[in-house]
Image (cartoon, grey):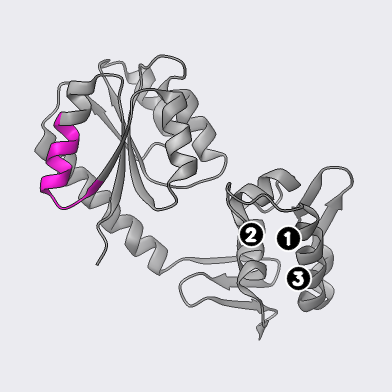
Amino acid sequence: MDKLKILVVDDESRMRKLVSDFLIRSNFSVVEAGDGVEAMEVFYREKDIALIVLDVMMPKMDGWEVCREIRNSSKIPIIMLTARGDERDELQGFSLGVDEYISKPFSPKNLVARIEAILRRTAKAESEEVLSAGGIEVNKTAHTALVDGVAMDLSFKEFELLSYFLENNGIALSREKILNNVWNYDYYGDDRTIDTHVKKLRSKMGEKGALIKTIWGFGYKLEA
């Protein structure tokens, strides 16, 4: 079984090494970044990161900005590290979708224990993950898609596209954002492939296909 990969982001190399050493001893794989900009580069490059340990105070791009950008496209678990003990920081972190908040100094063993607990919780949630809206239901674990209780025969990308629409129900999504999240950031093809897949998906959804609205010159939105 492959080791779960953790991204450790901190501008202090000693702190990165301390956290990384404990994670490696606990049978995790680790990638590191020394500032927010590098963290985003690693996040987009590495496709199998399971969790991010993210420092707040960093040059170029702080932890809040990194968290905000990641949450635009991913639900990956994030643990925030901060030297501050300010409750406002903690509240801001949770409002941005941070899973845990740990103040420095901290016990590396405690950090590893929290990481393991979050990953167990995340795995359980994913195993039960069902998305539904407007008579459309997707079970991401079983890889099934239903419309009004009737199974649809979807290709892998059509399934991923429908899942992404359901996860962002009511939100206008640009073609670029859809391409980046469904086809990944390393896809360099023509974004017209999105239009082709949306057309096929609508067709397979029957009357419910009309729930996927075209936003001319921008992209698409599911209204269910």
Quickly name the residue at label 1: 224
Magenta stretch holds residue 171: no
Give the side of residue 197 with respect to residue 32, left or right: right
Q: Which residues are magenta?
A: 18-29
Residue 174 appears in the rendering: no
The stretch drawn in magenta includes residue 27: yes
How much space separates mark 3 and mark 1, taking CA atoms? 15 Å
Q: Position of residue 16 (x, y in %)?
A: 22, 28
| Nearer the camera: disc 3 or disc 1 | 3
Q: CA distance from mark 3 to mark 2?
A: 13 Å
Give, as a three-letter code, the residue at label 1: Ala
- Classify residue 27 as left or right of residue 7: left
Residue 86 can be seen, yes or no:
yes
Quick check: 56 left or right of 112?
Answer: right
Which numbered disc, 3 or 2, marks the residue closer to the eye? 3
Kind of residue at badge 3: Leu
Kind of residue at disc 2: Leu
Q: CA distance from mark 1 to mark 2?
A: 8 Å
Picture disc at residue 54: none
Q: Residue at x 60, y 64 (%)?
A: 160
- SS at badge 2: helix
Q: Quadrant of the N terminus?
A: bottom left
Q: Identify residue for label 2.
A: 166
Image quadrant assignment for residue 21: top left
